[in-house]
Amino acid sequence: MTYLDPLADLIRSCLSPDAAPPADSAALFRIYAVLLEAKGEQVTDEDVHNAWSAWMQSVDDSHAALVPFHDLSPETRAFDSPYAEAIREAARRVRRQSHDV
């Protein structure tokens, strides 16, 4: 366990209930934790897609969505939004905690 794991857990806890993370996605959420650290509230859906693509390449390198974000249909792009919002919410919580200390 590293410093990224609590951030990954926080992101997961900020997900909307209708989001369905893929099975065995601990490594994916660690990448999302890196996005939280690097971009915080400025993370975009495209950032999330790129992180997911890096993870998915090791899971299923023939997945149909392994294309640039702008090449995806609007319906497929929408799958990234709940994760981007969860990362932004987690960043807001981390920021509030650091101000409270």
Image (cartoon, helix red, strand yellow):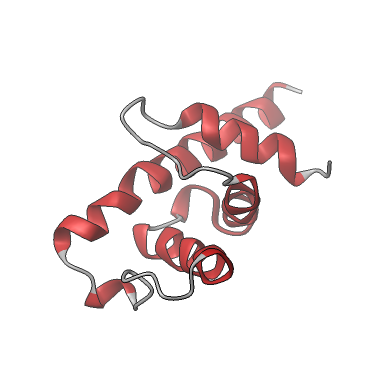
User: Which residue is drawn at the image coordinates 55% and 40% (left, top)?
Assistant: 91
* Residue 3 sits above or below residue 74 on the image: above
Give whichever of 92, 58 is nearer the camera.
58
User: Which of the image's four quarters has the C terminus?
Assistant: top right
Q: Position of residue 20 (x, y in %)?
A: 38, 37
Image position of 98 (left or right of 54): right
Residue at left 39%, top 58%?
A: 44
Which residue: 66% across, 39% down?
Answer: 7
Q: Quadrant of the N terminus?
A: top right
Horizontal placement of 57 versus 84: left or right? right
Pick the front one: 73 or 61: 61
Question: Residue 47, image x and y in percent?
Answer: 44, 63
Q: Residue furthest top?
A: 100
Nearest to the observer: residue 96 or residue 88: 88
Q: Is residue 23 above or below residue 34?
A: above
**Is 79 or 40 nearer to us in this picture?**
79
How many marks on residues?
0
- In the image, residue 88 lies at what x, y percent? 46, 42
Specify the quadrant of the image occupied by residue 83. Answer: top left
Left or right side of 22 for 73: left
Q: Furthest-left residue in view?
A: 74
Note whether 39 is above or below 95 in the view shown: below
Give me the residue at 35% from left, 41% from top: 82
